[in-house]
Image (spheres, rainbow, N blue to C red):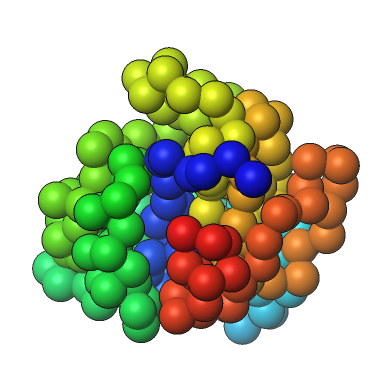
């Protein structure tokens, strides 16, 4: 098997417990924004539906579905405001890394080129990165904007161009089959699915959505992925 030379980590629910620490309040603020925009739904029902749909749908799809099902005269505003609240959560000045993440990053940095490839609001992702204090581990950090169609595939291609090695010498680690796993496979990289957070249960759609490795906690990463 080809030796890994570079590792691309996702941020949310791979290095930090976003689902547990930030999502509940972000979900509440998003649903409050929808209600303020005229969507006829209770806060509790809105949050319940969002949580149920989170595994397999994007939040644009989730909030659009809620707006259409429960009705509002301003569906565009309702979805826009909900997305604005959800993807710009209140980030505390200090966030803890997931258990075992610090030890893995320290160990892997000595042997591999580490990259952080994350997606979301640029300002919010920067705040999370700063709160975690992880900048020092990564050769480069990519923050992509899915709302304008950016995919992690472009970051992986840039990593391969920078490092000049073959695609199978890169491994993408993340918690979304439809993102880190699919986009990693599409450039020829190996992939590790970190089954953590509210997207557990996501169903594969394309052949590329099947990872090479699956883990549920950081203590298994190095052994399972052969790093």
Q: Is residue 69 visible?
A: no
Q: Residue furthest front?
A: 1
Image: 218 above or below 151: below
Residue 189 x/y as whole percent: 61, 37
Whether residue 88 sits left or right of residue 175 in the image: it is left
Within the image, what quadrant is residue 184 found in? top right
Whether residue 195 sits left or right of residue 203 in the image: it is left
* Residue drawn at x 13%, y 68% as measured from the top left: 93
Q: How many marks?
A: 0
Work out whether residue 112 or residue 124 is closer to the camera in this orientation and state it.
Answer: 112
* Residue drawn at x 45%, y 52% as measured from the top left: 10
Query: Which image quarter is the N terminus in?
Result: top right
Work out whether residue 34 or residue 102 is closer to the camera in this orientation and state it.
Answer: 102
Whether residue 155 sits left or right of residue 77 in the image: it is left
Whether residue 94 sits left or right of residue 7 in the image: it is left
Residue 54 x/y as whole percent: 67, 64
* Residue drawn at x 59%, y 40% as measured from the top left: 2
Q: Is residue 115 visible?
A: yes
């Amino acid at each position: 098997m080809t030796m890994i030379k570079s590792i691309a980590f996702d941020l949310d629910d791979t290095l930090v417990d976003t689902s547990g620490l930030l999502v509940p309040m972000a979900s509440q603020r998003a649903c409050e924004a929808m209600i303020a925009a005229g969507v006829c739904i209770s806060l509790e029902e809105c949050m319940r539906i969002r949580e149920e749909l989170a595994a397999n749908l994007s939040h644009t799809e989730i909030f659009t579905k809620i707006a259409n099902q429960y009705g509002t005269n301003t569906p565009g505003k309702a979805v826009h405001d909900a997305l604005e609240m959800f993807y710009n959560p209140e980030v505390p000045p200090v966030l803890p890394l997931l258990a075992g993440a610090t030890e893995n990053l320290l160990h892997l940095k000595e042997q591999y080129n580490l990259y952080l490839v994350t997606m979301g609001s640029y300002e919010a992702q920067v705040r999370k990165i700063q709160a975690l204090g992880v900048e020092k581990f990564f050769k480069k950090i990519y923050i992509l904007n899915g709302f304008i169609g950016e995919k992690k595939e472009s970051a992986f291609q840039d990593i391969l161009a920078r490092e000049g090695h073959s695609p199978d010498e890169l491994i993408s680690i993340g918690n979304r089959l439809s993102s880190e796993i699919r986009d990693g496979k599409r450039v020829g990289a190996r992939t590790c699915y970190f089954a953590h957070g509210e997207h557990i249960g996501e169903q594969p759609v394309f052949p590329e959505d099947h990872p090479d490795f699956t883990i549920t906690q950081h203590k298994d990463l190095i052994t399972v992925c052969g790093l």
